[in-house]
Every structure is written in structure tokens, then in C-alpha cells.
Image (spheres, rainbow, N blue to C red):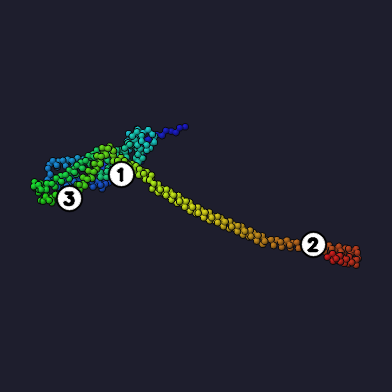
Amino acid sequence: MSEPEKPRLRPGQLQGVTQPGRRAYGFQSPLHPRQLAAMFGFLWCLGVFSAIQAPVLPLWTLFLYYSSFIIGMGAFLVVSLTDPGLNRNDTRYSEKVESTSPGREVHEGVMYCNTCQAYMPVRTKHCRLCHKCVEGFDHHCLYLNTCIASANYAPFFILAFLGTFVSGFQLALSCWMFTQHNDAQFVRDVVSFSAFSNADVYLGLLAFLNILVLGVFGGVGSLFAFHTYICVRGITTYEWILELRQKAVERENERLKKAAQSPAVLQKQEEARQAWQAERAREKERRARIQAREDAKRMADMEKSRQKSHQDVQMVRIDVESSEKAVLPHHEHERIHSQEHFSEHERDHESHVGSELVKKVSDLMGVGDLEEIMKEGEHAADSQQ
């Protein structure tokens, strides 16, 4: 009789498993310190530009800077408020799976996540920080406190580009302002439209405040350059990291392979093998000595136990014999006493019978004849002795 068919799994269902702490978007508490540092950096750039540079710059530079900054902030909000995670209750991917039990294998572009207990697309990775599966996972950005994936990669790329452009444009304007140090019109604009009465003090403060702007440009610019590179290659950051790991493993294997073929390495390996064999032989001999000592001790204990048992048996035997000897004289005394009593009674009886017989004989014979006969009997007995 065949077993009843198991019900087909609904791979998208939770199956009673919950994962507390799932992050839906970047602004969900708790906020990461790097996220706060990133927001402070961009607000610092905006503050330096608005308070120091904007009063003496042309209108077109202001329009370009502020419009780029506003678009960048919009991209920042889109990236932070978008949930790139997949819904584990979505059953779209279970229709492609033919097996009746979950596994790690891939079925026509679908893979199984053991943590979420649901089927997901192939390029999905489970984020251990967000506690969710993310389709097209690129990386988890600590500066945005959310995962970057297919759902929010486009606004993230725009944010990286505009962040690089705004900070770079601000540094370029600062450099241009330094070149205008000797321009009389620039000096008059600084005195007229800013709170500074001296252009040298103004430019010195501007140089100091732009140090952080330079750091923002370096960080965001390198990020934009890297993502431009991986976009050209058509891979994600996670896939690029896997490539690096695979190449590192291959290089290490190649190095070990080359090193294993060198005579010096072969000699060292042979020496190590011989040393290992010698150590193994010494360990085996040591264990044999320990086993021999244990066996000898065990045999000695057994011999002592046997001797003690033999002594105990001997003592018991001696005690039994002593008790028997103590009881035997009493019975023997009774037996001898009874034999002596019986012998005495028998002698009395014999003497009485003898005397009666002698008396009867004496009655029949004369007394003289009887005395003569007794004397002859005594004489015959003496002669026989």
C-alpha cells in the first residue's frame, strides 16, 4: 500500500517561523552612527556653501548647486524609504518549483532560503542586518542604514553621482574664489555681501571649512567611481566580493601547488613526515609501557587477592578442625567411660558365673582335688608365659 501523497508546500509561506527585528527602511530605529555622520556631512556642505560662499557667487552657480542638492536629497529619501526586501508570503516563485520538499537546489531561477523558509529568485541574498531576503542584493549600506538592491539601486546611483557632483562643484568654486584673491571686484563683494571686512580672513575660514567638504568628496567620489565600474561589468558589489574571494583562493592554491613542487618543500615535507612517524612510534612505545605497567599491577593485585582468599580458606579450615577437636574428646570420653563400665559389668558377671561354676564343681568334686586342679592350671599358665 503506497503512502499518501504529501501536501505540496507553499514555499512563500512563513510556516510558523517569525524573524523579529526585520528592517523595512533606512529611517527605522535604531539609527546607525554612520548614517548620522553621513547626514551631518551633507548638511555641513550645505551650511558652508549657504553661509560663506553663496553671498559672493553668481546666481547660476546657486541655481545649479541648490537644484542638484535638492534632487540628491530626494534620491536620499527614496533610497532610505524603499524596502528592497521580498515578501515571504509571496507565492509567485513557488509555481516554478516542481519538488515537494524545500532544499538548497535551484529550480529554474528559484532558490530556497533556509532562514526565511521561502523560495526566492536566484540573485537573492539574505541580509543578516535587515533580517530579510533582498532580491538583486548589492550591499548593505551603513551610511544609509538599509540594503541597496534592485529596488533602490537607481536612486542610490543618482545619489552617489549628485553627492560627488555637489561636493566637487563646491570645492571647485572654493578654488575659483582663491584665485580671485587679488581681484578688486571680488574683494568689494566679500566686504559688501558677507559679514567679513577682510578678504584674507574670509578665504582662510573658507579653506578651513572646506576640509570636511574635501573628505565628503573623496568618500562619495570613490563610491561613485566603484559603482560605475561594476555597472559597466554588469555585476553587483556582492558578486564582486565573491569574485575577489574566488581569485584569492585560486592564487593561494596556485602558490601552494608551485611551492609543493620545489625540492626544498619536498625535503621539508619528508622531514616532517619522518618526524611525525618518529613521534608516533614514541607515543606508541609510551602507551605500550603504560599498558604493561597496568597489566603487571593488575596481575599483582589478582595474585594478592588469590593469596588472601587462600589464607582465608586455610583459617576457616583451621577453625573448623579446632572446633572438631574441641568437641571430639567429650564424645570419646563418654565412649571410653561406657566401654569401661560395660567391661567392669562383664567381668563381674564372668567372675560371678566362674564362682558359681567353681562352687558347683567343688560340690561334685572334693575340695582338695579342686585346689590341685587350680594349681596345675596356674602352673601351666606360668609355663606358657
Look at the image and tell me whether residue 19 can be seen. no
Q: For mark 1, does the 10 Å Cα neighbourhood hold few (<14), some (14 to 19), or many (20 or more) residues?
A: some
The kind of secondary structure element at disc 2 is: helix
Q: Earlier in the sequence, mark 2 or mark 3?
A: 3
**70 relative to 188 in the view: left or right:** right
Q: Could you give the CA–CA distance between mark 2 and mark 1, rounded to whole angstroms?
A: 125 Å
User: Where is residue 106 drawn, in percent x and y?
Assistant: 36, 36
Q: Quadrant of residue 21?
A: top left
In terms of depth relative to the viewer, which is nearer, 177 or 21? 177
* Amino acid type for the residue under numbered disc 2: Glu
Q: Earlier in the sequence, mark 2 or mark 1?
A: 1
Residue 317: give x, y in percent of width and height.
63, 58
Q: Kindly identify which residue carries mark 2.
A: 346
- Cα separation, mark 1 vs mark 3, equals 37 Å
**Residue highlighted by disc 1:** 129
Q: Give the image location of residue 374, x and y in percent.
A: 87, 66
| Disc 2 versus disc 3: nearer the observer | 3
Query: As drawn, is 190 to the left or to the right of 261?
Result: left
Q: Which residue is mark 3?
A: 208
Whether residue 357 is visible, yes or no, is yes
Closer to the camera in the image, 270 or 346: 270
